[in-house]
Amino acid sequence: MNRFLISHILLLLISILNFGNCASPGFGPKGYIYTKTKIGIFGTGESSKRRATSCIHSVLGLFSFGDASLEFLKSRSKIQTVTETNWTTFSILGMYANLCVEISGNE
């Protein structure tokens, strides 16, 4: 390989490492290229009849939108008693990331 190609590859790697994680889910382990994790936050061990999921999104770390609050999820799914809460994170190349909150519970 010539020096020109090697210098461009090194510049690309440095750019990915420094700027590649602009959009981040914020929780759990993060990969520079790809992240997909599920984190158990709360659980009572009780069985549940209902389940609801909502996500928040980030684009380039510049724009974020969505509502994944417990109040929103409980009102949308008619859950009164939460028995389990999980977070799912996803990001790719630091360009797009999301955090989804999933709750389970009963009326």
Image: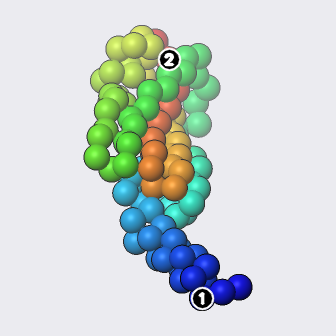
As displayed, is residue 3 above or below residue 103? below
Q: Can residue 22 be seen here? A: yes
- Characterize the local packing of mark 1: few (<14), some (14-19) or many (20 or more) Cα atoms within 10 angstroms: few
As displayed, is residue 96 above or below residue 27? above
Question: Total marks drawn?
Answer: 2
Residue under the image location 59 percent in, 50 percent down = 36
Q: From the viewer's perspective, tell me whether residue 6 is left or right of residue 59.
A: right
Q: Can residue 41 be seen here? A: no
Occupied quadrant, residue 94:
bottom left
x, y percentage for residue 70? 34, 29
Q: Residue furthest right?
A: 1
The amino acid at mark 1 is Arg
What colouring method underlies this structural image?
A: rainbow
Residue under the image location 59 percent in, 16 percent down = 49
Nearest the viewer among 5 and 47 is: 5
**Residue labelled with disc 2:** 106
x, y percentage for residue 31? 54, 63
Residue under the image location 33 percent in, 21 percent down = 72
- Characterize the local packing of mark 2: few (<14), some (14-19) or many (20 or more) Cα atoms within 10 angstroms: some
x, y percentage for residue 26? 39, 54
Q: Mark 1 and mark 2 in contact (Cβ < 8 Å)?
A: no
Q: Earlier in the sequence, mark 2 or mark 1?
A: 1
The amino acid at mark 2 is Asn
**Residue labelled with disc 1:** 3
As displayed, is residue 57 above or below residue 29? above
Q: CA distance from mark 2 to mark 1?
A: 63 Å
